[in-house]
Amino acid sequence: MTMIDTRPLIAVCIPFVAALLVSMSHKYPNIREMWSAIASILLFGTVISMTGGVLDGMTYEYTMFNLTDTVGLTMKTDPAGTIFATLASLLWIPINFYSIGYMRNNHEGMQTGYFAAFALCIGATMGIAMAANLLTFFVFYEILTISSYPLVLHERDEEALLASRKYLAYTLASGQLFLAGTVGVYCISGTMNFTPGGFLESHMAPAWVLQLLFVLLIMAGSVKAAVMPLHGWLPAAMVAPTPVSALLHAVAVVKTGAFAVLRILGFVFGPKLLSELGIADVLAWMAVLTILASSFIALRQDNLKRRLAFSTIGQLSYIVLGGALLTPLAFKGAYLHLVAHAVMKITLFMCAGCIIVRTHLHDISEMDGIGHRMPVTMTCFALASLGIAGTPFLVGFVSKWNLAMGAIQAGKPLFVLAWMASAILAIGYLMPVVRMAFFKPEPEGDPRHYGSTSYCMLIPICFTAILSLVLGIVPEIFPPDFYRLAELASAGITAGFGGVFK
């Protein structure tokens, strides 16, 4: 059942209004940060108010205006979009409070611009999550690119300038590919509306045309999802402040890329057409190569943030691979990993930021014994690292189990071996950080100066670390109910294709 409701529009507008209020309060830091905090809580409340209805089969929809009889700037809630909207709005709360502590403790400049751009990114992410069609998706996709650019440029030094230019070149090119694919889809189908199971059909155009449109749209999503060899902007963007890195990896940009891939696979082309075209297998193997190559590269990185960046490149391709397998369990696992990776990776980046603020250390080789002085931070780091590796009772295990079952359901158990190898490699590049922190002594005559603990940073880290544990033990108990939403999303995508599966 579809209901006309303004709440999808309100959810999108809250962060944009917050960005305006933040900009107007540049002379009053406490008020500026208050607007951001209030907006994050209001946004989560607005999204949660729709989640129960979505779980009961309700769709909330609002059209700002129509361009044609079949296309308008429309926002709506469906299970897939609600997963992403709930995730982004939930995580904006801890990362917002963490940002306040980080920016103050690290004495960062241009904080007003930082918080305003941060809010704009969240608003664009909400628009992407609730986009009802390709046009609406594209509009907010581009807004996200423009609003995240100042965050990558934040330091305003030579390195940040080069990184931000690289970021803008990659992501603007991604947007143009998306636009070209969107226009092509509209020309052959007369619509752009996302439909579970896809709205394109084989009789609409020759196979090569459909394959070309698939390549254009998937490449657009793959750039922001950092699928190799389109990943070059992501390690470079690590020059940004650590909360920005957490935003890029856990809430926006790379997550929107992965979400775009899932939308294109499940709601534009659909499993039936993709199985006829036979092109999804190419995407699957690209994802496998990305998973393994990025994991090996991560092993060689000494800079902690760069190691986490290459970890993200591999982990995001789990989601791409899950969608490319086209089975119910694989789609379910992909949506669950969208959540799992976000919760775990935001924890890791916030821990990295806490290390940087307190010790001014960036390289792993210099971190001997820091766990003795920072036990809470490094315990949370260890918990999230185990989750990334897929350890049972953590949220990463839930998503990876469903992904593995999806590969078996598709009759492609070889992909399970790729995931197993990746898990072993994840242990290899993350757990040595924990070993050095806890099981190596501090250097004799340690010259390192430890700054004071900021509870504004520490509490958000503990919150997301505990969340990764709760969602791993009882995934159905958390109020947003990501588990049921993922089941509904995957069921809708594969409803007309289910007889193929064993």
Image (cartoon, helix red, strand yellow):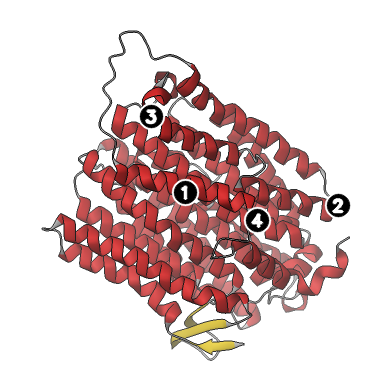
Q: Residues within 10 Å of mark 1 (few under 14, many from 20)?
A: many
Q: Residues within 10 Å of mark 2 (few under 14, many from 20)?
A: some
User: Dot 4, crowdedness within 10 Å: few (<14), some or many (≥20)?
Assistant: many
Which residue is identified by label 3?
A: 374
Which amino acid, by three-letter code, is at mark 2? Gly
From the top left corner, tell me how far across and down residue 383 is, in percent. Answer: 54, 38
- Give the mark nearest the N terminus, 1 or 3: 3
Q: Secondary structure at mark 4?
A: helix
Residue 481 horizontal side relative to residue 32, left or right: right
- Which residue occupies the foreground of this view, 232 or 267? 267
Instruction: For marks 3 and 4, give the CA distance.
Output: 34 Å
* C-alpha span from label 2 to label 1: 35 Å
> Which residue is under mark 4?
334
Q: Nearer the viewer, mark 2 or mark 1?
A: 1
Pick out the residue farthest to the bottom. 69
Dot 1 or dot 4: first in sequence order is: 4
Residue under circle 1?
A: 464
- Asked if residue 214 lies left or right of residue 30, the reply is right
Q: According to the image, label 2 marks what residue?
A: 411
Amino acid beneath label 3: Met
At label 1, which amino acid type do we have? Thr
Tell me the residue at 67%/74% (across/down): 196
Q: Is residue 407 left or right of residue 267?
A: right
- For badge 4, the amino acid type reads Ala
Is the residue under label 4 in contact with that under label 1 (CB below 8 Å)? no
**Mark closer to the observer (3, 4):** 3
Element carrying mark 1: helix
